[in-house]
Image: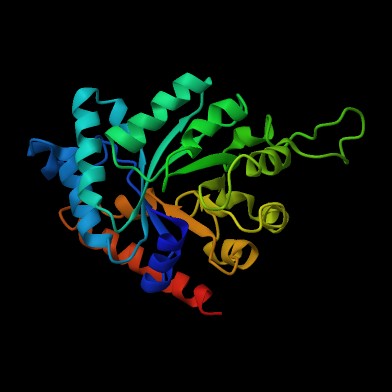
Amino acid sequence: MTRQQLIEEIRQKQSYLCVGLDTDITKIPQHLLNDTDPVFAFNKAIIDATRDLCVSYKINTAFYEALGVKGWLAMEKTVRYIGEEHFKIADAKRGDIGNTSDQYAKAFFEALPFDAVTVAPYMGEDSVKPFLQHAGKWAIVLGLTSNKGAEDFELQRMVSGDTNHGTMLYEKVLTTVAAWGSPDNLMFVVGATQADAFTNIRKQAPDHFYLVPGVGAQGGSLKEISEKAMNKDCGLLVNASRAIIYSSSGEDFAEKARGVAKAYQEEMALYLNL
């Protein structure tokens, strides 16, 4: 999916919602466990209930890889079922030496029809570039994440001595990685719980889209993110996973998921039209 196609979907649906399919087989409703493929059955119901309310789905590959071959097959069935109308993200956090990253890119962009892969930039340019060499595909590079461990490296200043001055590591990542691609094939992950940093981040990467996890179960504020980080093209994909897909553990799980997704979409429509 191209940047312009994504923007058009956002405008048409009045939504920048990304539904996270972090499907944990131990948390899905019990009645689905009798299905031959309970993970796909769960995902299919969630997709059917939310597809008109969101522009993207994010599949956290760890939850599928943990199930072995069956999990990988469920993931493949899911991404193909989503179709071409939505921006499909493999949340795989890959990134390795060039020839290995090239194989990762082929796995998600050629063997599987994902539009984007999340990428860890720690090993540098040659580990990211292979994901940027597929037409219509995207690398979503970790910028400033919402987990506690962000303090260990991302929020450290790159100077010795006075820690009140100097560039933070995540800022160096944003400015350096932005030069490797363009706003047409490169996004950044910025966690919703880092809302205070969004104004500064938008100055450093004014035209790029941000994938923003951490809304909902992790407590991030959709209003605050939208006010501080939205640009003229929206420039945001706000992900909600547990808050939507696990809103009920009963047979009404898909209906309840739709209700939560609808509430997000309606709030997003307000911010898009300010």
Residue at 58% over, 54% down: 208
Residue 252, picture quadrant: bottom left
Pinpoint residue 222: horizontal percent, then vertical percent.
Answer: 53, 62
- Front-lying residue, 20 or 27: 20
Residue sitting nearer the eye, 57 or 176: 176
Given residues 102 and 250, the one toward you in this image is: 102
Q: Quadrant of the C terminus?
A: bottom right
**Looking at the image, which residue sits at the far right?**
161
Residue drawn at x 30%, y 51% as measured from the top left: 245
Is residue 146 toward the left or the right of residue 23 in the image?
right
142 left or right, relative to 137: right
Instruction: State the image quarter where residue 141 is shown.
Output: top right
Identity of the residue drawn at 57% across and 65% down? 226
In the rendered image, residue 207, in percent from the top left (x then y), is placed at 61, 58
Location of residue 67 with respect to 274 vertically, above or below: above
Residue 33 visible here: yes
